[in-house]
Amino acid sequence: MTASTTEIPGYIAGTWTIDSTHSDVDFVVRHLGVSKVRGRFAEVEGEIVTGADLADSKVTATIKADSIDTKNADRDAHVKNADFLHVERFPTLTFVSTGVRAEDGEYFIDGELTVHGVTKAVTLAAEVGGFADGMTEGSKVFGISATTEISRSDFGVGASIPTAVLGDKVKIELNIEAGLKA
């Protein structure tokens, strides 16, 4: 075990399944330059591998695009159509890590994010929530939060929507709970 993994209390190397019920994939984008619109994707699945050495850790995640919820059904329908996510053509958003690293006590997950059929490199700033016993006897859970910011235009999302109407920068906030595979 490296120094970076021993700094994480209770660190457990293993393969973890993302628990969609106890995980959130949220986003924030500016609207008309004066307010922020928040939304979330309700359906996320994937796997986290915590390596014996932190650098050997990996993450894969798939988000169902049509599970978007902005608390407004009309807006959700618009975001699902060809103007934005085009969920019929691009039913999922995916993330595949390319590296996990610790720097000066902070954690980062580098990877490739695919949205709207476009793949771009992103870095998630991560905060380990911890490792604990799960709700059923003998089970273990792992929690992690992460943030990043992307440009919607880099992914071709809402290309016909002026940035004066909807900001280009989209902040993504992840709160993930995962269960250790037997």
Image (cartoon, rainbow, N blue to C red):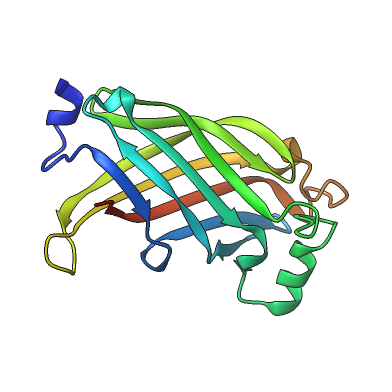
Percent position of residue 7, x then y: 13, 31
Q: Quadrant of the N terminus?
A: top left
User: Relative to residue 102, is residue 71 depicted above or below?
Assistant: below
Give left or right: position of 129 versus 35. Answer: left
User: Considering depth in this image, is 60 or 4 the residue closer to the camera?
Assistant: 60
Percent position of residue 151, x then y: 67, 39
User: Relative to residue 78, is residue 16 depicted above or below?
Assistant: above
Determine the residue positioned at 32% across, 32% down.
107
- Give residue 95's quadrant in the image: top right
User: Considering depth in this image, is 4 or 37 the residue closer to the camera?
Assistant: 4
User: Considering depth in this image, is 23 or 181 the residue closer to the camera?
Assistant: 181
User: Relative to residue 44, is residue 113 depicted above or below?
Assistant: above
Extreme residue toward the front, this view: 182
User: Considering depth in this image, is 123 or 34 the residue closer to the camera?
Assistant: 123
Determine the residue positioned at 18% across, 69% down.
135
Determine the residue positioned at 12% across, 60% down.
138
Give left or right: position of 157 versus 51. Answer: right
